[in-house]
């Protein structure tokens, strides 16, 4: 794998620095959106695990639930089996699992997403540091240009 190419910021002119800054801004925006989506997925997996845990120990005849027909329309229903659940494993596939296996499945998914969130946060932090460095160099360049213009005007 090739090593990332490093560039000395002090060697870049102001337009080049602006271009690099714009690219970093776009990358940060994309990474931040991805982070938010992963956070949402992590919360959904945690909710699923919690929901599975909530029916452990219930008796089927005692459990009345609301079954969603649409996002805003529900009908009352009764559970016929509280020992097994159907788990959405992705891409339209569903698997019947025991409550324990379902809880483990969702907990494992949540932990996997958390690991990716941690890696993504490190990447975001690195990009933010790079962005701050570029902004500092740009500000220094602008100050240098202003000082040069003032000195030229005095001559």
Image (cartoon, rainbow, N blue to C red):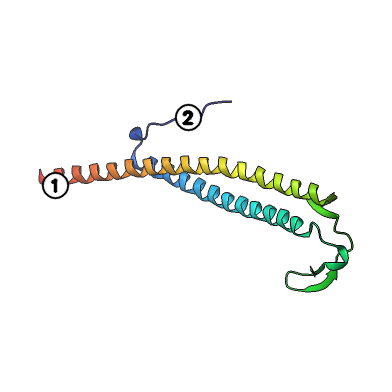
What x and y, as percent, mark residue 137?
Answer: 32, 40
Q: Which quadrant of the structure image shows residue 141?
A: top left
The number of numbered badges drawn on the structure is 2
Determine which of the numbered discs, if any, sits on residue 107 in the image.
none
Quarter containing the N terminus: top right
Q: Mark 2 points at which residue?
A: 5
Nearer to us: label 1 or label 2: 2
Q: In this view, does 71 lie above or below 95?
A: below
Q: Quick check: can you spot residue 58?
A: yes
- Residue at image point 60% right, 52% down: 39
Measuring 56% from the left and 42% from the top, which residue is drawn there? 118
Task: Identify the element where label 2 is drawn.
Answer: loop
- Where is residue 66? Give x, y as percent: 79, 70
Q: Quadrant of residue 67?
A: bottom right
Q: Earlier in the sequence, mark 1 or mark 2?
A: 2
In the depicted structure, whether residue 75 falls above or below residue 86: below
Q: Tell me, yes or no, whether the two marked residues, 1 and 2, touch with CB atoms within 8 Å.
A: no
Q: Residues within 10 Å of mark 1 (few under 14, many from 20)?
A: few
Which residue corresponds to the image point at 58% horizontal and 53% vertical from the top-left? 36
Tell whether 87 sits left or right of 140. right
Looking at the picture, tell me which residue is in the foreground, 126 or 54: 54
Say what secondary structure mark 1 lies in: helix
Query: Can you identify the residue that label 1 sits on?
Result: 153
* Residue 28, percent from left and from top: 50, 47
Task: Note whether residue 91 is visible.
Answer: no
Mark 2 burial class by Cα count in 10 Å: few <14, some 14-19, many 20+: few
Q: Residue at x 88, y 67 (%)?
A: 61
Q: How far apart are marks 1 and 2 (CA)?
A: 40 Å
Q: Is residue 131 left or right of residue 102?
A: left
């Amino acid at each position: 794998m090739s090593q990332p190419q490093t560039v000395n910021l002090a060697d870049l002119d102001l337009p080049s620095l602006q271009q690099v800054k714009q690219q970093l801004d776009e990358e940060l925006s994309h990474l931040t959106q991805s982070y938010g989506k992963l956070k949402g997925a992590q919360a959904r997996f945690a909710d699923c695990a919690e929901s599975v845990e909530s029916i452990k120990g219930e008796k089927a005849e005692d459990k009345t639930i609301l079954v969603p027909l649409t996002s805003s329309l529900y009908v009352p229903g009764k559970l016929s089996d509280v020992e097994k659940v159907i788990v959405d494993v992705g891409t339209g596939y569903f698997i019947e699992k025991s409550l324990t296996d379902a809880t483990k499945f969702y907990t494992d998914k949540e932990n996997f997403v958390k690991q990716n969130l941690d890696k993504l946060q490190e990447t975001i932090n690195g990009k933010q540091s790079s962005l701050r460095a570029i902004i500092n160099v740009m500000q220094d360049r602008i100050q240098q240009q202003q000082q040069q213009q003032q000195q030229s005007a005095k001559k």
